[in-house]
Structure formats: structure tokens, C-alpha cells
């Protein structure tokens, strides 16, 4: 064989190998599964977890930071505990004058009032006044204390969502009675994670979840697989009793196991009934699935307080809202729209 022929064969072999390498590389890139990255921060008094799916890790990182920045921005505006927040200024002006607030806080308050109306006051942001007597922290003796019935009853006249005066045109809110206080803790997280999810989508993220305590906002492309969300056993934090399939929805869960203590054999938790000023006692947990994360957040609290009978009746009447209720007796009730989308692994006793 001539040298020319040998060189031609070597050249052809080199080209073939190169093409094969490129082909294998291209197939590997094409078949590469999108990465799933979790990011966590402590904000809004809880751990915020953002899960993003995509191929561009740099983009995912930047998007997560932008979402956390948005959460932090709204926390500063709506926190009950931060000085000069919108909520702080509304409470400081109670019974005196209207407070100028942001359009975003006004939107949350208007949504809260709508939920208060449809639940006949089971949800009421003026429950903030109960913070004067319910602390869920140990006293100087290292003991957890409960207020007396007399102390609570004294505050009940200040729990009245009808006494919130909203001036949408001038973007102001006034509390009609001196001593009233609002707390957006039962609704603001839903709104805030919803806004953070919008930031992610605008930055090109196609699939993700923002999880803040009991509130979740999730999004994905219509043709992609739904998210599978576990339903926690309210009496065992290490177990789930079932799971629900969700696509492009908000999920909010309220339970008597989130912040509680046991005293003299009785469970005291942080979800208060506006009618009594004491912890609601008709449910163990409620999970709401809805389009709007703000409404889902408020409804999970309201339905928890209303209990399985009235709560499920309300859910069935509302459009694009579904739910699951675990009653005080452990019985699980599921709305008609969730049937076929929820798997219950074991029933509560």
C-alpha cells in the first residue's frame, strides 16, 4: 500500500473518530437531564426553600437570589414585627388617623377582607391584638403560660374586620378603634411567595417551587409532570399520610402542629378562633389548593377554624379552590375536585 493511500486512510479514520466523538457529545448534551437545585434562607420567621429546575446553573442561581430579594423586600413592608412597616404604621395609628401604605399591602388587606366576608369572620387580620396575651414563649420561670378567659374576653371587642377602613383611592388604611392591631401573618406569606414566583418566571425559569412554612407556590410547563406534594401526618412530623399531584397551583397548609405546646394534657396552638380568642379546636390540619397563593393562605386558616362541615361546604362553593381537611377526630375529608389527584396512604386514628 502506498504512503499516500495510508495517509488517506488515517485521515479518514481521524475524521470518522472526530465525527463519532461529536455525535456522542451531542447525544449526551441532548439527553442531559435538567438539574434540580435547592436554595434556602431564613426569612419571614421561617425557612424559605426555593427549588429550581433547569440546565443553566448560573441563571438558576441569579434567579433564586432575585426571588429571595423580593421576599425580603415584602417582609420589610408587611411584617408585624418590623418598625415602620406598613403594618406597624397602621397599628400605631389605630383609632386616630389613616396610615398611607403601599399598593401591595393594600391589595393584601383587601383580599383579607374578602376572605373575612365569605367565611363570616373565621379569618380576621385584626386578631393581631391577641398578641398581647398569647406569646408561645417561656416566662421567667421557664414555663409556657396561657392567658385567662377574662384577659382574652377583654380583647374580643377589638377583633372586628368591619372596623378596617380602606381608602383605595388614596392608598390608606385606618383601624376605627384605638387598641386594634392587624397581623398579616395568615395571608402575607402566600402573597409574597406568589410575587417571588413571578420574578422567577420573568427570569426564564420554567419549573420551580417556593416553600415558606405551610405555603407553597409552584409552576411548571403545561406538558411536564405535575409536582407531588406530601401531606404531613399532624401527629407525627416524620410521616406523611398521603400526597397530592399539583401543576401551576398554590398549596397552603394550616395545622395545629406548627406552633404549639401541651399543658395539663391540652394542646395550645397558634391558630386562634376570632369568636373565642382561644385556639380553634375543630381541625388538626387543612390543605388548600388554589390558583391564587394569597387566597390559598388565608383560606387554609379560615377553613381550619370553621372545621370539616362548614369548611368543606365553603370549599365546594368556591371556584378554582380545592381542599383536604383532617378533622379533630382524625377523619380525612377531600373535596370533589381533588379526588383522583390525592393518594391517602393511611387513615388517621
Image: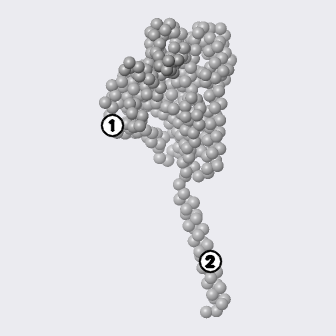
> Which residue is rendered at x = 64% and y = 47% of the image?
59
Mark 1 near mark 2, Cβ–Cβ under 8 Å? no
The answer to whether residue 176 is left or right of residue 270 is right
> Which residue is rendered at x = 57% and y = 68% of the image?
23
Count of numbered labels shown in the rendering: 2
* Residue 252 against residue 263 in the figure, above or below: below
Q: Which residue is mark 1?
A: 346
Occupied quadrant, residue 49: top right
Measured from the top left, where is residue 135 in percent x and y? Answer: 52, 19
Q: Residue furthest left?
A: 349
Measured from the top left, where is residue 46 in percent x and y? Answer: 55, 31
The color scheme shown is one colour
* Closest to the observer, 243 or 257: 257
Occupied quadrant, residue 191: top right
> Which residue is rendered at x = 50% and y = 29% of the image?
296
Measured from the top left, where is residue 176 in percent x and y? Answer: 60, 9
* Residue 143 against residue 2 in the figure, above or below: above
* Closest to the observer, 38 or 219: 38
C-alpha gap between disc 1 and disc 2: 62 Å
Q: Secondary structure at mark 1?
A: loop
Measured from the top left, where is residue 47 in percent x and y? Answer: 55, 34
The reply to whether residue 37 is in sight is yes
Q: Which residue is mark 2?
A: 14
* Residue 235 against residue 13 in the figure, above or below: above
Categorize mark 1 by other alpha carbons within 10 Å: few (<14), some (14-19), many (20+): few
Q: Where does the N terminus fall, quadrant-wise?
A: bottom right
Amino acid at each position: 500500500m502506498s504512503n499516500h493511500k495510508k495517509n488517506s486512510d488515517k485521515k479518514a479514520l481521524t475524521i470518522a473518530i472526530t465525527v463519532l466523538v461529536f455525535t456522542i457529545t451531542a447525544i449526551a448534551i441532548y439527553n442531559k437531564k435538567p438539574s434540580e437545585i435547592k436554595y434556602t434562607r431564613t426569612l419571614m420567621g421561617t425557612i424559605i426553600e426555593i427549588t429550581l429546575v433547569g440546565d443553566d446553573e448560573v441563571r438558576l442561581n441569579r434567579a433564586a437570589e432575585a426571588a429571595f430579594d423580593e421576599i425580603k423586600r415584602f417582609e420589610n413592608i408587611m411584617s408585624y414585627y418590623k418598625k415602620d412597616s406598613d403594618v406597624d404604621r397602621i397599628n400605631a395609628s389605630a383609632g386616630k388617623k389613616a396610615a398611607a401604605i403601599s399598593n401591595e399591602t393594600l391589595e393584601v388587606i383587601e383580599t383579607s377582607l374578602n376572605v373575612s366576608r365569605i367565611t363570616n369572620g373565621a379569618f380576621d387580620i385584626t386578631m393581631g391584638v391577641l398578641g398581647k396575651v398569647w406569646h408561645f414563649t417561656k416566662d421567667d420561670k421557664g414555663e409556657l403560660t396561657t392567658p385567662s378567659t377574662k384577659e382574652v374576653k377583654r380583647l374580643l371587642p377589638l377583633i372586628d374586620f368591619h372596623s378596617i377602613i380602606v381608602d383605595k383611592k388614596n392608598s390608606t388604611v385606618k383601624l376605627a378603634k384605638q387598641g386594634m392591631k392587624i397581623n398579616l401573618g395568615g395571608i402575607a406569606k402566600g402573597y409574597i411567595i406568589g410575587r417571588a414566583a413571578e420574578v422567577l418566571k420573568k427570569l426564564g425559569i420554567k419549573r420551580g417551587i417556593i416553600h415558606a412554612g405551610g405555603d407553597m407556590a409552584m409552576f411548571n410547563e403545561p406538558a411536564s409532570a405535575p409536582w407531588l406534594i406530601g401531606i404531613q401526618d399532624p401527629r407525627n412530623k416524620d410521616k406523611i399520610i398521603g400526597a397530592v399531584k399539583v401543576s401551576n397551583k398554590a398549596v397552603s397548609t394550616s395545622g395545629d402542629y406548627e406552633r404549639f405546646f401541651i399543658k395539663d394534657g391540652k394542646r395550645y396552638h397558634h391558630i386562634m378562633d376570632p369568636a373565642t380568642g382561644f385556639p380553634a379546636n375543630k381541625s388538626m390540619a387543612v390543605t388548600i389548593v388554589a390558583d391564587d397563593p394569597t387566597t390559598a393562605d388565608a383560606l387554609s386558616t379560615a377553613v381550619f377554624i370553621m372545621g370539616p362541615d362548614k369548611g368543606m361546604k365553603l370549599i365546594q362553593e368556591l371556584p378554582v379552590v380545592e381542599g383536604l381537611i383532617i378533622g379533630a377526630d382524625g377523619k380525612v375529608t377531600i373535596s370533589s375536585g381533588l379526588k383522583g389527584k390525592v393518594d391517602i396512604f393511611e387513615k388517621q386514628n
